[in-house]
Image: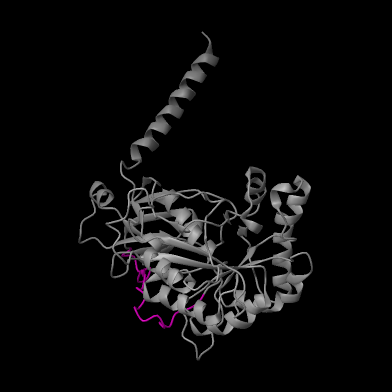
Amino acid sequence: MDFRNISKTLFGATICAFTFGLAGNAMATTPFTTVPWNGHVGAASFTFDDAMDDQIKNLTPILEELTDVRVTFFLSNMGGNRLTATGAGFAKLAKMGNEIGNHTDGHLQLPDQSDDKLKTEITDFADQIEKVMADNGAEVNVTAVATPYCNNNEKVSAEIDKRQFINRDCGWHGRNDWDTEPKWLGMASRVWNSSETATAELLSALDTAAYIGDFGAANPWEVQVKGGSWLVLLNHGVSDEGGMSITPADIKSAFKRALENNLWTAPFSTVGAYHRAHFTLDKAEAIKDGEGYKVSWELPHQHMPKSIPLKVKLTDDFLKEAGFTTNDNIVLVQGGKEIAPDAQGNYTLEFTALSATIRKASTLGLGTPRQNKQPRENTQASNKIYDLNGKHLKQNRDVHVIKVFGK
């Protein structure tokens, strides 16, 4: 008798039984559906290129006033030492919760560069940005690139992908629909160029992102507007010089229009990470785990922001299949802490935790579940503000601020 074959057979049968058991515990329906655009009708990400002094001078007071607005600054040395020269000003903006991104060292035509030069321009420069920001007291995690001249190809994208999860190119209308996964390393954006109609067109674009207007009569060959979307906007200088520069008055007007339209006005990586995470989380399966159900997932990219809070709902099909009733007090559990829904039934989970358990609230005296509080409609609501690393920022007592990731 060949005992080796018997052992192999028994071992294989055990593995099959174990695998079948796990599959048998998996739910047929997925438990989570992510709330689009963090509970807003759409989103707007204002980005500013080239590390310009007038961005610091003119945007700092506006962003100090409009605390519901946070933007992205793509920094470059521009062939000199601009990063060091402007480091203190952009570090201050970073500590306010604005994103610092990578616009490459020399602002060159990237497709024309060698592999070694691309590494210097993109990957090494991201490290340099983080160091300069740290030297000026700001903890920064560079997760986004903006290609100079919006010139990109497969070789450039491959280098970007080694260190950042998302890249902004330019052109076209700059809108992204919720259920359509974009080209993460070649995101389009709407470019500002001064003209007699530029301001009105910018405000109209913000209305379109919020699905404000009559889109039923659009020609079939035009881009169809189906609902709220994420609008990515490319800007350069903030001054009265014209050309590629937008005036302080016009950019402030655009910020206010975005807020009035209930657009989530947040940095490029913040909205991008939320959008990208939902394609992963909404497919994650629930596995029976004791008295509850465990849901696990993986990061779609290793270089995303350190904190990605997602607003989610439990699907009706999952609740029915799991046998939960409307009388059950259902919570999510992450890191040993219970998370209760807000008044709209939304839970806020931390995507980078990579798992969550769904179960009835504890009755063992572990304390009241943490409830997700619904943001007030007043845009001056008093909440905490966090940077792209999920770090709580100190706040001025005289300034009411909001939670960057939570609102």
371 part of magenta stretch:
yes
Badge count: 0
Q: Is residue 53 magenta?
A: no
Q: Is residue 214 left or right of residue 327?
A: right
The quadrant of the rendering that contains the C terminus is: bottom left
Residue 32 image offset from top left, x and y in percent? 35, 53
Image position of 7 with respect to 41: above or below: above
What residue occupies the far bottom of the structure in this picture? 398
- Residue 241, position as x, y percentages in the image: 62, 78
Span colored in magenta: 362-385
Q: Nearer the viewer, residue 156 or 249?
A: 249
Q: Position of residue 301 (x, y in %)?
A: 56, 50
Q: Is residue 147 visible?
A: no
Identify the image's colour scheme: rainbow, by chain, secondary structure or one colour.
one colour
Above or below residue 45? Residue 218 is above
- Left/right placement of residue 385 relative to residue 323 reads right
Q: Nearer the viewer, residue 95 or 1?
A: 95
| Majority secondary structure of magenta residues | loop
The one nearer the camera, 367 or 122, is 122
Q: Nearer the viewer, residue 323 or 78?
A: 78
Left or right of 9 in this view: 74: right
